[in-house]
Structures are given as C-alpha cells and as structure tokens.
Image (tube, helix red, strand yellow):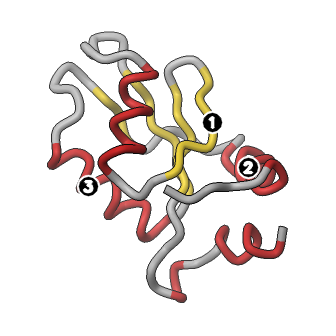
Amino acid sequence: MENLRGKQKHYLRGEAHNMRPLFAVGKNGLTDEWLAQLVGALEKRELMKVNILQNADVTTAEVKAAIESKTPITVVQTIGRVLVLYLQASHDDDRRYSVEVEKL
C-alpha cells in the first residue's frame, strides 16, 4: 500500500469521477481468487472503481480493510458502496496515472 499525499489523492479522485465500477463484491465476498484478479486488473489500469453489491455479506469498511491488508492496492476513496482503488503499474507501458501522481 502506497502512502499518497492529499494532492495525489485529489488528482486520482478527479480522474476516477467519470469511471464506472469494473469489479463488484457479491454474496461470495472477498476470496483470494477475487483479490488476485483485482490486482491483475489494476496492474494494467492503475485506477478503477469497485462496487459492493446489496447482497454482499461484507461492509464497505471490511472490504477496504481486506484490500489494504492483503494486497499492495491503495484505497483512494470510498463513496457509499463504491471504492476507488489505485496501484502503480509494474510495466512502464501501462503507466498513465502514476506518472502524474509522481509529479504532484
């Protein structure tokens, strides 16, 4: 998990504003397989939203805690049942947001 400063979080929240959630937490909850898929997707995208469905057996706080403790992902923001996630891409070709974040 990366420690982001206020300006960096503000930039990432702004970039994620018009995004639609790409992943959802459902009644199966947070499995290791789901977390691995999430990390893989963030390796390519760097920034995405995750939606917690109404039928999920976990709360937003539990999802946030699990993601931050079991993965290198940073939770930038939570809005209701939606989380904004950030992870710097390991390949230079996939870096888009992290280049701007480092400048701030």
Is tag 3's residue or tag 1's residue first in the polypeptide sequence?
Answer: 3
Give the labeled residue for mark 3.
Answer: 37
Choose top left, top right, bottom left or bottom right for residue 99. Answer: bottom right
Is tag 2's residue or tag 3's residue first in the polypeptide sequence?
Answer: 2
Is tag 2's residue or tag 1's residue first in the polypeptide sequence?
Answer: 2
Mark sitting on residue 9: 2
73 or 20: nearer the viewer: 73
Q: Residue at x 49, y 74 (%)?
A: 89
Is 43 on the left-hand or right-hand side of 17?
Answer: left
**x%, y% of residue 82?**
52, 28
Give the labeled residue for mark 1.
Answer: 77
Are the residues at dot 2 and dot 3 in contact (C-beta closer than 8 Å)?
no
Kindly identify the amino acid type of the residue bearing the numbered disc 3: Gln
**x%, y% of residue 90?**
45, 80
Secondary element under disc 1, as helix, strand or loop, is strand
Choose top left, top right, bottom left or bottom right for residue 103. Answer: bottom right
Q: Relative to 71, is 50 above or below?
A: above
Q: Residue at x 26, y 55 (%)?
A: 37
Mark sitting on residue 18: none
Judged from this view, the residue extending furthest toward the bottom is 92
Are the residues at dot 2 and dot 1 in contact (C-beta closer than 8 Å)?
yes
Secondary element under disc 3, as helix, strand or loop, is helix
